[in-house]
Image (cartoon, rainbow, N blue to C red):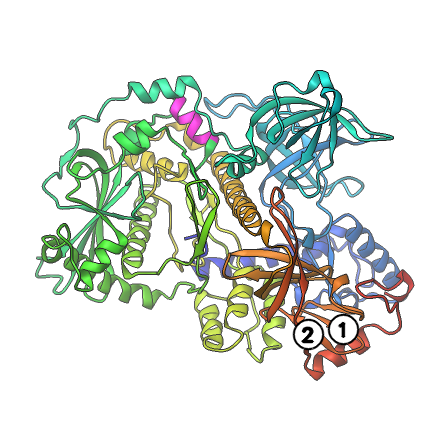
Amino acid sequence: MSKLPRDPFHRTDRKAGRKGRADADISAGKDEIVHGVVPPREVLLCFIADHPEQASKREISKAFGLKGDARVELKDLLRDLESEGLLQKSRKSLIRPGALPPVTVLDITTRDKDGELIGRPAEWSEENGVAPAVLIRQSSTNRGDRAKVPTAGLGDRIVAKIFPSKDRSGPAYTARVIKIIDKNRNASLGVFRPMPGGAGRLIPIDRRGEEMAIDPDFTGDAKNGDLVSVEVTRGGRYGLARAKVLNVIGSVDSEKAISMIAIHDHGIPYIFPQPVMDAAAAAEPAPMKNREDWRHVPLVTIDPADAKDHDDAVYAEPDPSPDNPGGVIVTVAIADVSWYIRPGSPLDREALKRGNSVYFPDRVVPMLPERISNDLCSLREGEDRPAMAVRMVFSKEGRKASHTFHRVMMKSAAKLSYNQAQAAIDGNPDDKTGPLLEPILKPLWAAYAIMKAGRDRRQPLELDMPERKILLKPDGTVDRVFVPERLDAHKLIEEMMIQANVCAAETLEKKRQPLIYRVHDAPSLAKQETLREFLATLGISMAKGGQVRSNSFNGILAKAEGTPHQTMVNEMVLRSQSQAVYSPENIGHFGLNLMKYAHFTSPIRRYADLIVHRALVGSLGLGEGGITPDEESALDDIAAEISTFERRAMAAERDTVNRLVAHHLAGRIGESFQGRVSGVTKAGLFVALPEYGADGFVPVSTLGMDYFIYDEAHQALTGERTGLGYRLGDSVEVKLAEALPLAGALRFEMLSEGRKMPPAMRSFHKTARRGGPKRPGTRPPRGRR
């Protein structure tokens, strides 16, 4: 549920406020900013961010009334901003590159001339140009009862609060250290290979890594093929760098080596410290004290067939109230994790350190020990379990009339899989679902039909992006990649969880209780402009202005449905969206089109949900385990940290899938595959293989004897001489030229001939560049750009 909506009016007000501040900056500085004079860089950057449609040099000059020497000065300033990574070119315009999030994971890589630490974002897309430098400001601030942040050093990976720098002569950002998540990032990961004389070599797992030599005294217990972490002991001025083995992780050919690479590479904690395990072992079942007895309510869990923990259960019934004819009551019960995980305890500190569970094809790195997640908090069939429950009343039109929260003791009536529940509704019940069909399953589906009417009226963003799953063999290698069928059972549980999350946010806001929201901002003006230009090439219009709503995008998706461009348009709309994050400040959820939204339904695997549970317990007076004042004062930092750890988990999961597929295809070099162009850059084409869920790269230099021009608006590479090219979404045939399993990289050669580009595109290319080199894939000399 990461791509979903919020209150458009709040968005409009906030945008208007930002624009107002920009205007105020200009007007307030009239003593310094004169019409016809180049504005200060802060005002210029603000103008470009808020007016992407006016971000060419010509339009900027017109907006500020610049002529003659002032235009030359503007050109020099823009060039400086571009070299600092604060701007990048997009066709004839300038845009702000992917700005750093308010909280970012940084690798501290060097020191400046004054000895200050300099970091760069750990995750950075090469499409955004050079990663910006960040000046690290050390902090000794205590936040409540949380530990003092230790002093960061060279080589550390940190979570940091990001601030735009006011110093024009230094880095673009400054940062305050929130947490050090990995000391000494100078340690590298690779595969050990023995050499004559007892020495060894480190073969890097990263495609940008370097091979290193390991002296005989520093090989430790490493054997051939072991995955090891090493520390660089000496730079390789005239040869290979020298390294020392720090830790032997295990054989690279072992069943779980692929996920272990990602775990170590991204610094994900995966071993529970002994005090945490001791605390989990000492935990006892929750008592009935201060709980309502709901063990008679036939709540059922509906999960994937292979699920090991069950943190949500549902039940629905007709509303007997004569004031709500045709209405329903929907009950959602969630495992009461807050009873077991108390603020400041060893279990709590470790859960915050992880932020969320991480899911790989071959393993799960859980947020909580199994004694908690798979036993005491798992809503097992036929066993008493503590829960936080919400009863929601809906009218027959799907409008929520009321809701109430309860701290209960429940007993799951049945554990069902999605396929099992769906089969029963479709007329194929088994021995277990047969007796449940009339009293439990049919009322659930009837309630979902009513809730769906409300969802359809709300019109959340409806992207069609099927999620692929990898099925592994017993030896840990890939068996097959498939797209699971999207059932009504999935949608039923999803909608009931969304509504429970809404209720949590509404209740806490009404109680004026600080909480962590799940927020999703509307697309930036710059991203809207990029999407608008792309859609125009397909003959699809998109209204201008900052008041875009989720149903605006649904209209675009509807126009593309059933056309050859359907997948391509879905991908471009997805790319235009902001990333959902956690925040104590509510801006709503754009994708879900909801004004108030907080994660409440998965406290076993997400720390944000645990915070919301504690807030509910405390604000509603439901007993022990409520939120503390220290926690409330630290919500800004907690939200920032768990947002960062969520991105870390996503990157690790993605890297693992790429490596698994590369391993799977490594023995098929030279074979041809049917694919689809999934990305277009100046350097070449990314081609997706739908059958395997993998992407590979086709370098532009291998496309043919022509000069290929990158057209961002059309998402295309077009040969200048032939007019033939490739565009996002094109079906192509490629040959696998190289597979690097440890790096998760595939390189293809294009077998399909490019298609003739539309005349409008070819005419653009003719005027975009004249002359230049005739070698394929090369850039024109600087004087001809």
Nearest the eye: 635 or 533? 533
Image location (x, y in percent) of residue 369: 36, 28
**Looking at the rendering, which quadrant does residue 568 occupy?**
bottom right
Nearest the eye: 44 or 639? 639
Q: Which residues are magenta?
A: 346-353
Image location (x, y in percent) of residue 414: 17, 45
Query: Which residue was labeled with disc 2?
Result: 754
Image location (x, y in percent) of residue 785: 85, 65
Q: Which mark is residue 719?
A: 1
Residue shown at the point (44%, 61%) measured from the top left = 466
Give the left or right position of residue 165, taking residue 69 as reference: left
Instruction: Determine crowd level at label 2: few under 14, some 14-19, many 20+ residues with C-alpha closer than 10 A.
Output: many
Q: Nearer the viewer, mark 2 or mark 1?
A: 2
**Looking at the rendering, which quadrant does residue 368 occupy?**
top left
Marks 2 and 1, Cα distance to the nearest angstrom?
9 Å
Q: Is residue 509 above or below residue 712?
A: above
Q: Most extreme residue toward the front, as rendered? A: 196
The three-letter amino acid code for the residue at tag 2 is Gly
Residue shown at the point (37%, 21%) measured from the top left = 277
The three-letter amino acid code for the residue at tag 1 is Gly
